[in-house]
Structure formats: structure tokens, C-alpha cells
Amino acid sequence: MFTINDKSNYVSEDLCESPIERIFLSEIVKYLEVGTQIGQQIEYSTKIGNFRVDFLIKKGKLEYVIELDGKEFHKEENDIWRDSFLLGEKKVKTIIRIKGKDITYNINECLYFLSQVFPESFSQRGKLNLGTLIEPKNKSTIDENIKENLFDCIDKFYLEKMEFDLDEIKRYPSIEISIKDSTKFKYWEKLYNFALKNKIYDIVELNKKYFKK
């Protein structure tokens, strides 16, 4: 675990397993609050196997995992079971999944979203700076969604990204961020309970039984 300080915040990228992890790490450390800890490739043991998370961020009692989903590195069905057991067994408190394309093309929107959902882990200056790096319309959409908690019941936040060029609105593919929390009943808990009830602790078998794959 690396602790953010008020001097140099160079973090080795040796543990990064993909280009999007390197991009995310090099950017997020610019905005985190002093004293926030960030760990890479932290391993947890569950009934369905051992799993490493991309990033673990901690500040006091606050703790959340960031997973970056690139098509070449992840299979969605497997990730769902993995998340369900990490949360169900209380290995982690919150899991945030961000798509690789959004790290590449929309990193500022993603970091601003995180800074508003987990403000304790971001510096005041970092939050202000991130707010100036995105279009005002995108900022207000994120703020409104967080205030109203519009994504709370479906686990996902969507943002149709907009940019303005000479008063012309340009629209881009939407940003998608998923949020799973161990303290709230969501889809992940339904899957976790299914596995426990049927005493199935193999991901391949779970996919066959639950998703019919």
C-alpha cells in the first residue's frame, strides 16, 4: 500500500497488468488526499477462488475497490460471481467497475465521479481541479445524479458525454460506471445467495446453472 503524501507521489507502475491500469494510477494520485492509501493487485481468498483486485483505496474507515474492465482482460459473467463473493464474504466493502474505454477517453469524468462519491479520499484542491477539467453540462449531470442517487437501485451510473465546440453540441458514447456495495441489497446478493443455496462454488458450474451458459 502506498500512502499519499504532500511531497512526491510517484507510484511504481510495476504491478500494473494493463495499459489502462497505468493510465488510471498515474492520474488518480494527482487528486487524492494526503493520507489516502492506494494498493495494487491485492489478493483475497473466497469459496470460489482467490482473486486480485486492480486497486484498493483506503482513507480512515473509507475503503473501496476499483476494477478496470478491458475486453481482453475480463469476462463479465465471471466478474459478477467474483464481485458477489468478495462482497458476500465481506472481503471488501464497495466495488467500482469502470470500463477501459472510459479510462482512455473519459478519465476526468470518471475521477470527478469518484471524487464526489468518495470525497474523503480526494483533496479539496483535487476535487476543484477535476470539476474544471470536464464540460459544465457533464459536471452538472454527475452532480445531479449523485444528489438524487438515481443510479442507486440499478448499480450503474450512465453519462452521455457532451462537448461543446463553437456552440455545437457533440455527443459521445456514454460512460458507464457500476457500483456494488456490501451494505445494500442489490443484484450481487441474489447471485451470492443462489450459490450458497445450491452449494455451488465453481464459476464455470455457476455460469451453467444460473446463466445457462
Image (cartoon, rainbow, N blue to C red):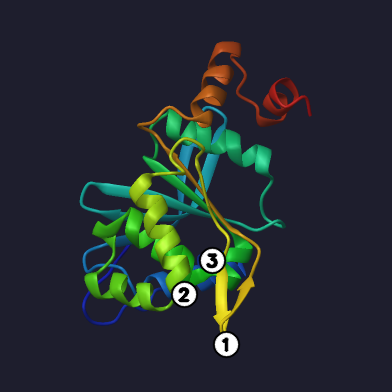
> What is the secondary structure assignment of the residue under circle 1?
loop
- Which residue is denoted by mark 2 in the rendering? 135
Disc on the earlier residue, 1 or 2: 2
- Measured as percent of width and height from the top left, residue 113 is found at 41, 60
Q: Residue at x 39, y 44 (%)?
A: 149
Q: Which residue is drawn at 56% across and 70% down?
A: 162
Residue reaching furthest to the top: 197
* Label ID, residue 1: none
Mark toward the viewer: 3 or 1: 1
Q: Is residue 163 among the parts visible in the rendering?
A: yes
Quarter of the image holding residue 2? bottom left
Disc on the earlier residue, 3 or 1: 3
Distance in Å between CA atoms under marks 3 and 2: 24 Å
Callout 1 environment at 10 Å: few (<14), some (14 to 19), or many (20+)? few
- Measured as percent of width and height from the top left, residue 178 is found at 52, 47
In-front residue for pair 1/114:
114
Residue kind at label 1, given as amino acid type: Leu
Distance in Å between CA atoms under marks 3 and 1: 34 Å
Q: Which residue is drawn at 51% across and 70% down?
A: 107
Left or right of 137 on screen, residue 2: left
Left or right of 140 on screen, residue 188: right
* Label ID, residue 21: 3
Residue reaching furthest to the right: 213
- Which residue is denoted by mark 1 in the rendering? 166
